[in-house]
DNA sequence: GCTTGACCCTGTAGTTGCTACAGGGTGCAT
DNA sequence: ATGCACCCTGTAGCAACTACAGGGTCAAGC
């Protein structure tokens, strides 16, 4: 499989595939006589793992650890659990933070009654946190 | 006011203040004989506006537009409203996306029963989106 | 046999919003 | 005069890509 096929098979940008190779997330594949990268099924499933994990929000370093783990099938899977649980907690924290932001923004947007910038409640609210009802 | 005082007054890193000046978000202040930046109240309130807007998640370019608007008090404030409303919608979209992610992650994490990596349901789920119940 | 177009290669620079130096100058107290 | 806190410029780093520039390869069609 050439890089374009792998790209289509996994929905990954070609430049991203080369990037993953450069940072050591994907192993360097064999090359054809013309120096083209030549991938097999193992590459495809490894890249799918990476993309799916990225889609779920894991960082590259987290994925690196998860790949190390799955490369070593006899190891205890506790670390995978820890990484995934920590990530879940981060997502929850991020949601909580965005919800506070959303409520504050909705309050701010709702105050605009039109008119000139000098009288705009939106601009006033952005200039002074004391108009806010939440910490953020 | 020297840059350190402005930094303390607004809770902004000194390097960040210089960065904002470099990208044209804050006007270059006067300098003392020793070439130190010297700020006044107008700078302080402009920087507060910037920081507060950043805390609310606006991008630098959005803040640039908002500042242009507030520099021109006779202009109609409709654009401020549009920027803030668009940003609110983005925050809502991001929350919705993270909620989907959180639910999927919670499902994945909940499936780990311990044991070796070869049998881990977390690693299995990360490798194959077909185990997922949502699009993400 | 020669061109056209799709594909591939390397290497580098750009994105966002900062943050962290390195290597130097200034100002005040002891 | 020497320490220390503070200031200056300029550059490089972070995450995770993305976008070229400038070149090579290969099969199809004329
Ligand atoms: Zn308004
Ligand atoms: Zn606020
Ligand atoms: Zn497990
Ligand atoms: Zn999935």
Image (cartoon, coloured by chain):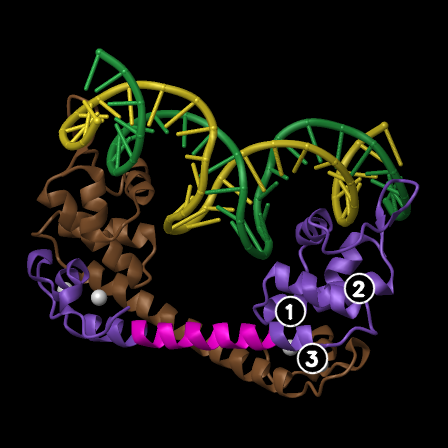
Chain colours: A brown, B purple, C green, D yellow
- Helix, strand or loop status at disc 1: helix
* Vertical arrangement, residue B43 with respect to residue B112, above or below: above
Task: Give whichever of C29, A26 is nearer the camera.
Answer: A26
Q: Residues within 10 Å of mark 1 (few under 14, many from 20)?
A: many
Where is residue B73, by image quadrant? Answer: bottom right
> In screen coordinates, is D22 left or right of B115?
right
Task: Give whichever of B44, B87 is nearer the camera.
Answer: B87
Residue B44 is marked as 2
Q: Is residue B35 magenta?
A: no
Instruction: Please name the residue shown 26% across and 65% down the image.
Output: A84
* Vertical arrangement, residue B51 with respect to residue B2, above or below: below
> In screen coordinates, is B48 left or right of B103?
right
> In the image, residue D13 lies at what x, y percent?
49, 39
> In screen coordinates, is A22 left or right of B38?
left
Q: Chain of mark 1?
A: B
- Helix, strand or loop status at disc 2: helix
Quarter holding the C terminus of chain B is bottom left
3 vs 2, front mark: 3
Residue B99 is marked as none
Q: Main secondary structure of the magenta part?
A: helix
Residue A122 is marked as 3
- CB-based contact (under 8 Å), mark 3 and mark 2: no
> In the image, residue B132 lies at what x, y percent?
18, 70
* Vertical arrangement, residue A26 with respect to residue A91, above or below: above
Q: Dot 1 corresponds to which residue?
A: B53
Residue pushed farthest right?
A: B33
> Are labels 3 and 2 on one chain?
no
Instruction: Please name the residue shown 11% across and 44% down the image.
Output: A42
Disc 3 residue: CB within 8 Å of ligand 1: yes
Magenta span: B84-101
Task: Give whichever of B84, B120 is nearer the camera.
Answer: B84
């Amino acid at each position: 499989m050439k890089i374009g096929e792998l790209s289509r098979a996994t929905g990954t940008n070609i430049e991203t595939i080369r990037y993953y190779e450069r940072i050591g997330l994907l192993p360097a594949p064999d090359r054809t006589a013309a120096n083209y990268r030549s991938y097999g099924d193992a590459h495809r499933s490894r890249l799918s793992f990476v993309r799916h994990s990225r889609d779920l929000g894991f960082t590259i370093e987290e994925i690196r650890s998860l790949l190390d783990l799955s490369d070593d099938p006899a190891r205890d899977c506790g670390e995978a659990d820890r990484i995934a649980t920590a990530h879940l907690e981060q997502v929850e924290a991020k949601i909580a933070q965005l919800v506070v932001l959303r409520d504050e923004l909705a309050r701010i947007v709702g105050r605009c009654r039109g008119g000139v910038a000098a009288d705009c409640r939106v601009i006033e609210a952005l200039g002074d946190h004391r108009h806010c009802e939440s910490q953020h």
